[in-house]
Image: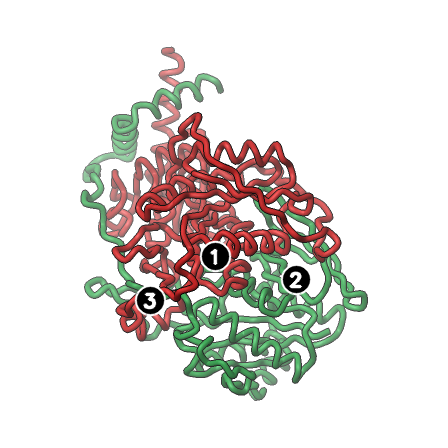
Chain colours: A red, B green
Amino acid sequence: MAEPEKQTSAAPNRAGMKKELPEHFKAYKHVWVVIECEHGQVHPVSYELLGEGRKLASKRGVELAGVILGSDKEVISAAAIDAFEYGADLVYTVTDPALAHYRNEAYTKAMTDLVNTYKPEILLLGATTLGRDLAGSVATALLTGLTADCTELAIDDEGSLAATRPTFGGSLLCTILTLNYRPQMATVRPRVLPAPVRQAGRRGRIVEHPLGLLEDDIVTKIVKFIADRDSNKAQLAYADIVVAGGLGLRSAENFQLVKSLAEVLDAEYGGSRPLVQKGWMTSDRQIGQTGKTIRPKLYIAAGISGAIQHRVGVEGADMIVAINTDPNAPIFDFAHVGIVADAIRLLPALTEAFRKHLSVNRLAG
Amino acid sequence: MHIVVCIKQVPDSAQIRVHPVTNTIMRQGVPTIINPYDLFALEEAMRWRDKAGGEVTVLTMGPAMAEDSLRKALSFGADRAVLLTDRYFAGSDTLATSFALAAALRKIGEEFGAPLMVFTGKQTIDGDTAQVGPGIAKRLKLNQLTYVARIVELDPERGNITVERRAEGGVQVLSTRLPVLITMLEGANEMRRGSLEDALRAARAEIVTWSAADAGISDLTKCGLRGSPTIVKKVFAPPPRAEKAYQIETSGRSMEALADSVMREIFKRQPSLESELMRFSAGQ
């Protein structure tokens, strides 16, 4: 990702530069998606990327490939079928005991070998702890461009990957190109893209590739894996209803009002970035560009102004209901329903209204 | 044990404003700070120095004014500060940044002793890429440990380290060999208050200032804009939705009446939600 200096000063010169892809990169074709497959399960962000990758590949008139690294043949076969049914034409697999769990060294070796052998023009990864760890190493090893945490991917008029992401701490968006290097790499956070429709029975071909690395050559060892006990941590991104608070709540105590409404609605709760900085809430509940991206059916934002960095994290919601005292707050530019009111007063009333409505109807039922 | 912490001076992003008409960043008077995530890296480095002995060097790349952030780091208790500054670095993307920092780290190794550990924050608050740390690790062949929540064990003599690393759905406990590149997770520690002596020392300390040539960089095509594979095509504010939010009338109404309207509007637009919530409520 480019540094701020670039965008203001020299960017226009280079953006106008004529694209001349060096000869040795002209063989680079096809769109790849790294399928994250850990503990026997595919991370849903991989399906989301396949859906987007399918569109990019079709626009470029090339194939879409999934890349699956792992140790268990059955898990990899099942993940390959998933990949085909979500749009992949082919799947590259590397199966080796050394790939049983994610380790930078082994995964970087596998990925760079695959890229150098089969030459994709676009390589997409999920912006997870795995994807970001791996992408930074692979891009540096290949000396190519990498754009992190994209909110939109497109093919521009000249056939390049146009990767859009928030910049300046989320106050503006910028579109980034990797013109003279291949592959063009990008990461996308979970839930930024919609999940594609599965096409049952769709199949493709599998290309197996060796790892070419022995366990003894790998320096880093996994001592153990401690699974999270608080399953809530993972659920915010995939919740149906989310209630969140912002600085408009004015105090840490008032954040309880958000939790109460969430409880009545069987919802997850969260908040905007300043709440983490103020210590009102832990960072795993932060919603926005640098926290969780959500796509619930209903999102209630209480006392959140709606800076771009927050907006890009919630725009996928089916319905956004915003409560803010400031009628000019940016959140009303992208919310569906707005209420100019003090969230501290409206939240308890709303909690009570839902509680009554749901219990009355329960009695009636 | 020599430890190097890479930090970045960033605008205090909470205070960045976008001009409402021109959509450009209003930079005037925006204060700068040390990237907050880097403070966890710096504190962790100083703790292990305090335990095992040795020195902590802070390194940053940036304009001359980035010296402020280095002095701040010295006032917290870092032992030495290196500023890498040169107009050839302007416009660096993450690949070009890791190239320059890797060169400076090699030079630091020659001048002040090879570091056993290099720390960075997990990401910056202005770029948010989390790519420079892994880039440095790859270039210097350091064992890479990102999103480290805790250093469980460190044995500089034997060259072993064990850490807890935040992973998807859990924590990986990893053991590896020094030298390592660690990106530190937020909340891992709390930055100390610097002592008065440190504050005085920081004010008069000499900042080691290196140009590209000083850092041993001979190939300037790998620096700055020229060395950056990514280019910024455009910067823009997202357009508002075609339709503004439907505003629920609030004037002269009680909170109860207003809340009722909000609930009815939600269920009118999303009837399936109402039935789902009914089922949830009935199951309670």
Q: Quadrant of the N terminus of chain B?
A: bottom right
- In percent of width and height, residue A51 lies at 39, 39
Residue indicated by mark 2? B143
Quarter of the image for residue A101 reads top right
- Under circle 2, the secondary element is strand
Question: Of marks 3 and 1, which one's residue comes earlier in the chain?
Answer: 3
Does mark 2 fall on the same chain as mark 3? no
Point 50% across, 40% down: residue: A91
| Cα gap from disc 3 to disc 1, whole angstroms | 45 Å
Q: Residue furthest right?
A: B158
State yes or no: discs 3 and 1 in contact (Cβ < 8 Å). Answer: no
Chain at tag 3: A
Question: Marks 3 and 2, Cα distance to the nearest angstrom?
Answer: 36 Å
* Image side of residue B40 versus residue A357, left or right: right
**Above/below status of A318 relative to B152:** above
Q: Chain of mark 2?
A: B
Does dot 1 land on a helix, a strand or a loop?
Answer: helix
- The residue positioned 42% from the left and 55% from the top of the image is A28
Is residue A305 at least partly visible in the picture? no
Badge 1: chain ID:
A
Q: Which mark is residue A20?
A: 3
Q: Closer to the camera, B30 or A151?
A: A151
Q: Marks 2 and 1, how far apart in space?
A: 31 Å
Residue B59 location in percent, x, y? 56, 76
The residue that disc 1 covers is: A277
Which residue occupies 81% across, 65% down? B158
In this view of the protein, can residue B217 be seen by the observer? yes
